[in-house]
Image (tube, rainbow, N blue to C red):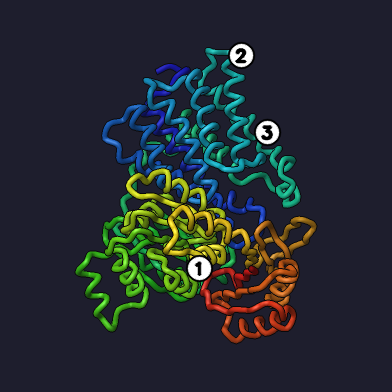
Amino acid sequence: MSSNSIDAQLMARMFQAGARNLEAKKEWINELNVFPVPDGDTGTNMTLTIMSAADELKNLDNVSLETVSKAISSGSLRGARGNSGVILSQLFRGCSKVWRNESEINAENTVRAFQKAVETAYKAVMKPKEGTILTVAKGGAEKVRELVEKNPEIGIEDLLRQTIDYMEIVLNQTPEMLPVLKEAGVVDSGGQGLVQIMKGCLNGYLGIEEEEAGEVPEVVYAYYAEFIVKSAQHISKEDRLKFVAFLESMGGDIAAERCEQGLKCHVRTNDPGAALSKALEYGVLSRIHVSNNEERPEHRLHLFEEEELQKIMQDPEADSEEEEAAEAAVSMMAHKDVGFIAVSTGDGLGSIFRELGADCLIEGGQTMNPSTQDILTAIEKVNADTVFILPNNKNIILAAEQAQNLTHEKKIVVIPTRTIPQGIAALVNYMPEKTPAENEAAMREEIYGVKTVELTYAVRDTKIEDKTIHSGDIMGVGDNGIIAVGTDIEETAMDSLTHMIEDDSELISVYYGKEISQEDADRLADRIREKFPDCEVEVNPGGQPIYYYILSVE
C-alpha cells in the first residue's frame, strides 16, 4: 500500500480511531447544545451511533473493503440515535455505497464517496437546514473534490489534513448561518462531532494512537455492573462527570446517562463493590445487577418467553414493571390488523398510552433517544400487518423513519409527533373503522393543532432570542423555542400558557412530572381555570423525569 491509498485493514483502524476520538469528546460536544436544557445529548447520540458500527467491525471474520463498508453502514444505521446520529449514519451509508465496490481507497474514489455521503444525508432530512452537520459535511466533500482536481496524485495525509482544516473553517461559520447558534455563542454540535471523527481518522491513518500507547493488550474485566442512582436528577453535570471519571479509572464500557428513574450506569470492572460504594455518595441505588463475564443485557424492551409471561401474570408478588411489560407482550401475541408503538417516559404517561391502545412502549424521549434498532425490535414484536409509530419527540422522528425504511414485512406508518401531547392526540383520534391511509391523514392533521410547552431548568447561563437565562432558571420550552423564563415553576408555567392560548383554544392538558406533587399540580390547574375560564383543564400524572410539567393547548 502506498501513501496514496488505504486498504481494508487500515480503513477499519481509522474508523475505530475516529470513534474513540468522538467518544472522548462527547461531553464537550453535549455542552454545545443551543438550549441549556439538562439533557443536551448530540455528543452522546453520535457516539452511540458510531460505536454501534465500531462494535460490528470487531466481529468481522473476513476483512475487505466490502465487508468493512457494509459493517460500518449496517451498524450505524441500526444504532443511530437522534437526528445527529441518523444523519451521521447516512453519511457513512453514502461512503459505503462507493467504497464497498473498490479494491482500495484512493483520492479519486474518496471524491465520489464524500459526494455520495452528502447526497444521501441531505435526502434523509425532509427540510435540510444549513449551519448544521450537513453543511460541514458538504464543505468537506467540496474541499476533497477541489484538492483532487488540482492534484490527482495528492497523498492521503495531505488530503485529510487540508479537508479537516477546511471543515473547521466551515464549522466556525455555522453561527453566521444559524442566528440561534450565534446568540448562544456556540458552533453546531453535530458539525463539531463530525470534525472530531475526521481528526480521529487522521490519527488512525498516522498510527499516532498506536505509537503513543504501544502494544497494550485489551483489558478483560471480570464483572459487569449495572445500576440506577435514583436521585440523579439533582446531581450537577460537574459531579456526574467526576463520577464518570472515577468509573473510567477502574474499568471500561462506561455509561452514566439520565433515564426515567435517575442516572442509569454501567461499568465493566474487577471491583464492582467500589463502583457501587462511590455511587452511594450521589443517591439511593436501585436495579442493581452484577454479573460475571456476561454481555450487557437489553434494557429498552423486556422480552419474555411464553412460560415466563404466564408466571409473571399469575404471581401476586411480581414487580409492577414486570407486570406491565408482560401484559404488553401478551397483547402482542395475537395478530391484529393495526398495531401501535409509542415512545414514552414516565409511569403515568406510559399508562395513558397503554389505555389508548399502544401495543408497545419504548422507553425514551428527551432524556434518552432510542436507537433505530430499538424501534426495529419493537416493530418485530407487534404482531400486526400495519404498525403506527409515534416518536413523540422531534429528535426521534428520523430514527423512526429509518426503521420504517429498513422494514419490509409490515407496513410502517410514522406519524411525526414531536411531543407527548401530540402522540396522545394522534391515538385519541384513531378510528378503527377507517383505513390506515385515512387514519394517517387524520392523525397528521390533528397533531398540528396541538401546541406544547415543557417546563425544565437551565444548566448554564446563556442568551437566546433576547432572553437572558441563568443557570437554575426555569424555562418553558415550546414547539419552536423557549417561550418563557423565570425563577418559579408555577409562574413560568402560567407565563408560558399566556403565550400559547388563542381565542379558539378549548382544552389545556397538564402532565406533571415525578418531582411535582398532585397538590402542586391541582393548584396550578386552579390558577389556569381562573385565568382561562373558557378552556377545559385536565390534569394527569405523567411521572416524567427532568421536565416538571408538560402542558398542551388544543
Question: How many residues crowd around disc 2 within 10 Å: few (fewer than 14), some, or many (20 or more)?
Answer: few
Q: Which numbered mark, 1 or 3, is in the foreground of this view?
A: 1
Return the residue at label 1. 428
Which quadrant is the N terminus positioned in? top left
Instruction: From this view, report whether residue 324 is shown above or below residue 237.
Output: below
Q: Badges 1 and 2: C-beta atoms under 8 Å apart?
A: no
Return the residue at label 3. 169
Seen from the viewer's position, the closer of residues 446 and 230 is 446
- x 40%, y 73%: residue: 286
Mark 2 and mark 3: Cα distance apart in space: 20 Å
Q: Badges 1 and 3: C-beta atoms under 8 Å apart?
A: no
Circle 1: residue type: Val
Task: Give coordinates of residue 228: x percent, y percent.
Answer: 43, 69
Which SS class for mark 1?
helix
Disc number for residue 150: 2
Q: Is residue 252 visible?
A: no
Question: How many residues crowd around disc 3 within 10 Å: few (fewer than 14), some, or many (20 or more)?
Answer: few
Circle 2: residue type: Lys
Which quadrant is the C terminus positioned in? bottom right
- x 67%, y 62%: residue: 478
Task: Give coordinates of residue 429: x percent, y percent.
Answer: 51, 65
Q: Is residue 266 left or right of residue 191?
A: left
Q: Is residue 10 left or right of residue 314?
A: right
Seen from the viewer's position, the closer of residues 86 and 157 is 86
Residue most extreme to the left? 307
Query: Tag 3 or tag 2, which sits nearer the N-term?
Result: 2
Task: Give coordinates of residue 399: x percent, y percent.
Answer: 47, 49
Question: How many residues crowd around disc 1 within 10 Å: few (fewer than 14), some, or many (20 or more)?
Answer: some
